[in-house]
Image (cartoon, rainbow, N blue to C red):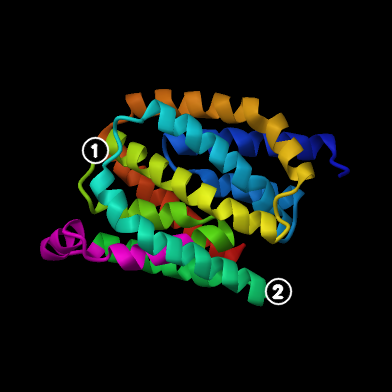
Amino acid sequence: MDISTLQYIYIGLAAFLIGFSKTSIEVGILAVLLLAMVFPGKASPGVVLPMLIAADIIAVIYYRRSCQWHVLVKLIPASAVGVLAGAVILWALPDLNFERVIGWIILAMLVFDLTLTSAAKQFIRGGGGAAGFGIVGGASSMIANAAGPVFGIYLLQMGLNKVEFVGTRSWFFLIMNVAKLPFAIGLGLVTPQTLTLDAMAFPMILLGAVSGYVFLRLINPQVFTALIRMAVLVAAFRLIFF
C-alpha cells in the first residue's frame, strides 16, 4: 500500500479525532472525511473500524462507572438488527451510495429533536422510539460509520448528564463495533494491511482520547449539548453533500 507523507498526516489527524470523539464531543465525521481522502470508496471503513474499537476500549476504561445500562438494554437488540440489515445492503447493493439517504434521515432526526414536546420526550425516555433509533443507528454504522449522530440525538432526550452521556455512548459503540467486525472482515474491508496502519495510528488515538477526557471535564453542560447538536448537523451535511 503506497501512502505519501501527506496521507500519513491525514491518517494521524484522523486517529487523533477518533480518540477525541470517543471521550468527548463527537467529531468523528471529520476523521471519516480525512480517511476518505486517503482511501476512496469502501476501503475507508475497513481502516476506520479497528481505530474505533481501540478508541472505544479507551473510553470504556475512562467512563466504566458512568454507563446507564437501562438505556443500552433498550437499544442493543434493535441496533443488532440494523447492523445486520446494513451488512446485507452492502453485500447486495455494493455500488449504490446510501450515505445521502442516511444524511437526510439524520437531518430529519435533528429537526425532530429540536421540536419535541415535553410529552414526546417523556415517551422516548420511557422506551418509546428505542427500536427506530436502534435500527437506523445500526444500519448507519454499518454502511457509513455514521451512528454517532443518531445515537447522540437519542441520548439527548434521555436526560443524561455529560459524563453519563459519554459513558453510555462508549459502551454502546464498543459493543456495536465489535459486532460489526466479523461482517467487515467477511466483506474484505478489514485486512492485514489495514490493521498494520491502525496499529501505527494507535499513539494518536490515545493522545486524542486523553485530550477529549480533559476537554469534557472543563466544558459547560449547556455548551456540551449545543456542540452535540452542531456535530449532528455537520455530519448530516457531510453525508448529503460530500
At 55% across and 54% down in the image, what residue appears?
180
At 45% across and 47% down in the image, what residue appears?
175
User: x and y percent of residue 24 in the render?
Assistant: 41, 35
Check if residue 74 falls in the magenta segment.
no
At 33% across and 42% down in the image, what residue appears?
168
Residues at circles 2 and 1 in contact by the CB criterion of under 8 Å: no
Identify the disc placed on residue 161: 1
Picture quadrant where residue 77 is located: bottom left
Q: Where are the magenta residues, as a range?
A: 115-139
Q: Residues within 10 Å of mark 1 (few under 14, many from 20)?
A: some
Q: Is residue 106 visible?
A: no
Q: CA distance from mark 2 to mark 1?
A: 41 Å
Quadrant position of the N terminus in the picture: top right
User: x and y percent of residue 173 in the render?
Assistant: 45, 46
Considering the whole magenta stretch, tell me its main secondary structure: helix
At label 2, the amino acid type is Asp
Q: Residues within 10 Å of mark 2 (few under 14, many from 20)?
A: few
User: x and y percent of residue 133 in the render?
Assistant: 35, 63
At label 1, the amino acid type is Asn
Q: Secondary structure at mark 2?
A: loop
User: x and y percent of residue 184 in the render?
Assistant: 64, 56
